[in-house]
Image (tube, helix red, strand yellow):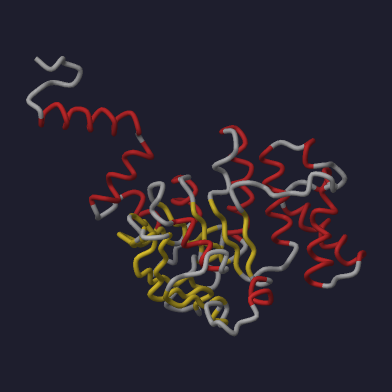
Amino acid sequence: MTQRTRGGRPMASSTVRGAAIRIRGLHKSFGNEPVLRGIDLEVAEGEVVCVIGPSGSGKSTLLRCVNLLEEPDTGEVVVGGTEITDPDVDIDAARRRIGMVFQHFHLFPHLDVTANLTLPQRRVLGRDRAHAAAVARERLERVGLADKAHAYPGRLSGGQQQRVAIARALAMDPEVMLFDEPTSALDPELVGEVLAVMRELAGDGMTMMVVTHEMGFAREAADRVVFLDGGEIVEQGPAARVVGEPRHERTRAFLRRVLDPVAATTAAEAAEGSGSGRTPGSSPG
């Protein structure tokens, strides 16, 4: 049997690899509003999982529960064999194994790029100045920004700042990377440079859980796509199948809106007009 590949290596399979992330029975509410309703999900070592779904579906909350930035009401989250939802866990130690990249960059504006990468290494990992600087140089080269080592964030484009944020997370040597819509705050022409770095990480075998609206990235770089709606997993499976041939009507409706919003709007208006006995655009009698 021919193995699918991504980035020149076999794509991850949860049947042959251990679980890097395991989520069981996860529930989360804000006040009286349920946001996550019993999520069960595993991400294998070296697997790339993209989580898609409409705004308000619980995608970002799910991601933030993985490193306890949001505390679940009930359920279990295990990362690298450590249950981070255990009340007795050393959460700071557990988080050192998890890199996270947010929608916004959260760089220190008064520090240059190198200092943005070395400060957390020295404070959290206890690395000396020389070691931290060497790691910073390597990670900046990895994201294509070696020439910006002494620039300040305010002198960088949004795409460059997000790549610095990725390099900063990688400098901590995480076992898994979480991405919360990392391109949503960028101008369209800057999205590609960030996605290129993420594709390279995927090809290198980094375990990644990515919340995204970039369907092209999900189809090309992910092993698996999970569609979340109303705080529940509606559908999941191989990326090409879920994005290209979704089985659930809710998934199909979401992808129509994302991939062809004009056609989706036209179809919705036509359906509304048909239901009212009028043609779209006609006046009400």
Which residue is at the front of the view, 178 or 200? 178
Residue pictured at 48% horizontal, 50% vertical:
212
Left or right of residue 43, residue 193 in this image:
right
The image shows residue 136 at horizontal and vertical percentages of 82, 58
Report how many numbered discs are placed on residues in the image. Answer: 0
Which residue is at the front of the view, 96 or 49? 96
Residue pictured at 53% horizontal, 68% vertical:
66
Which residue is at the front of the view, 20 or 9? 20
Which residue is at the front of the view, 27 or 53? 27
Residue furthest bottom in the image: 88
Which quadrant of the rendered structure holds the N terminus? bottom left
The image shows residue 198 at horizontal and vertical percentages of 60, 53
The image shows residue 36 at horizontal and vertical percentages of 38, 63
The image shows residue 201 at horizontal and vertical percentages of 62, 58
Left or right of residue 278, residue 97 in this image:
right
Where 92 falls versus 64 (above or below)?
below
Residue pictured at 91% horizontal, 64% vertical:
129
Left or right of residue 204, residue 57 in this image:
left
